[in-house]
Image: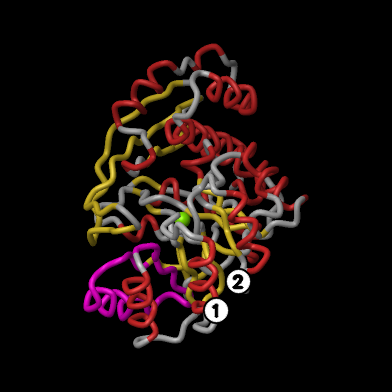
Amino acid sequence: MQLTYNTFEAKLAHPFTVSGYTRTTTPIVLTEITYDGVTGFGEASMPPYLGESQASVIAFLEKVKLEQFKSPFELDDILTYVDKIAINNTAAKASIDIALHDLVGKLLGHPWHAIWGYTASKTPLTTFTIGIDKEEVVREKTRETSAFKVLKVKLGVDEVTDKMMINTVRSITDKPIRVDANQGWKDKHYALSMIEWLSERNVEFIEQPLPKHNLDDMAWLTERSPLPTIADESCQRLEDIPRLKGVFDGINIKLMKCTGMREAHKMINLAEVYGMKLMIGCMTETSCAVSAAAQLSPKMDYADLDGNLLIANDCFNGMRLIDGKITLTDHPGIGVKKM
Ligand code: MG
């Protein structure tokens, strides 16, 4: 097994603002693992606020010695070893995990959704995200979303801005909206009054309304909220799920947070035991990582897999959307072709 990697800079089609940050590019590292003439593709995407960089990913990948394993079919042992090399580094770990899954799926001749026994037709709709921006930009962006049946709107600034965002989207369309406050609301009473206001405007759920460590207030809010609450920043890995039971109604799984497809699959199983709703999300990523996430999507109540659509220089062909619905193919592995 041979691991190789290259840096890649994803250029964003529009500057992207979430609560606290604006940016025009996302640093990425693309990985390949080759075995017996077959190559699997992987990716690490590093939004700056998560603490990883191209340099930290490459420093991590330099420590990964795959030669000690006989074959990629030792996937579970390989990824347990990779996880133990260093703490954190979740995107770097995901870049190995995704490439290894792609490779093993190709060697088996099946896509991962089929290997897991997921029904391909059960894929959800995906949202398209509208970031925080000036009123005229929000209006223009909303008009460009005709291909999507559900929108995701970023909030979490202040009451005037947040209500302007929703009112502006609502001046263009009545489509269902999912709201992500990205920890932007600091007070539980204020958050509840905002959620009550949103619940009268065809909003389906609220993602991460409060700061990630504020679980006591979050449990208070979920108990009273007229809309389901979904953990994003509060839920990184499998080990986080038990303490989120009763605190949120559901979790947003992202491959770059949770080290990849292997752990995401375990998170689905555990969240199902707890009766929590499931959502799959992504960073700004190429179609490589987005297509890997799409393999898990038949199990999801909600999906936000628009990361590949936000970049102008995608270098993979993969997951397709038909009428805003994630559509899986029979292509083996994660189902991507390099362009
Ligand atoms: Mg989020």
Would you say 75 lies left or right of 184 here? right
The reply to whether residue 292 is visible in this rendering is: no
Mark 2 to mark 1 CA distance (whole Å): 7 Å
**Residue nearest the observer in this picture, 273 or 286:** 273
Q: Does the CB distance between marks 2 and 1 fall below 8 Å?
A: yes
Residue 95 position, x and y percent, is 44, 34
The part of the image, by quadrant, that contains residue 14 is bottom left
Whether 154 is among the magenta residues is yes
First in sequence, mark 2 or 1: give its number. 1
Q: Residue at x 63, y 62 (%)?
A: 222
Q: Secondary structure at mark 1?
A: helix
Residue 7 position, x and y percent, is 28, 34
Up the image or down, 102 lies above or below 210; here it is above
Residue 286 position, x and y percent, is 36, 49
Q: Residue at x 55, y 78 (%)?
A: 199
In the picture, the disc for residue 199 is: 1
Residue at the top extreme, as displayed: 68
Residue stretch rendered in magenta on the structure:
130-157
Would you say 312 lies left or right of 275 here? left
**Looking at the picture, which amino acid does disc 1 mark?**
Ser
Q: Callout 2: 10 Å neighbours few (<14), some, many (20+)?
A: some
Q: Secondary structure at mark 2?
A: loop
Q: Which residue is mark 2?
A: 227
**Looking at the picture, which amino acid does disc 2 mark?**
Leu
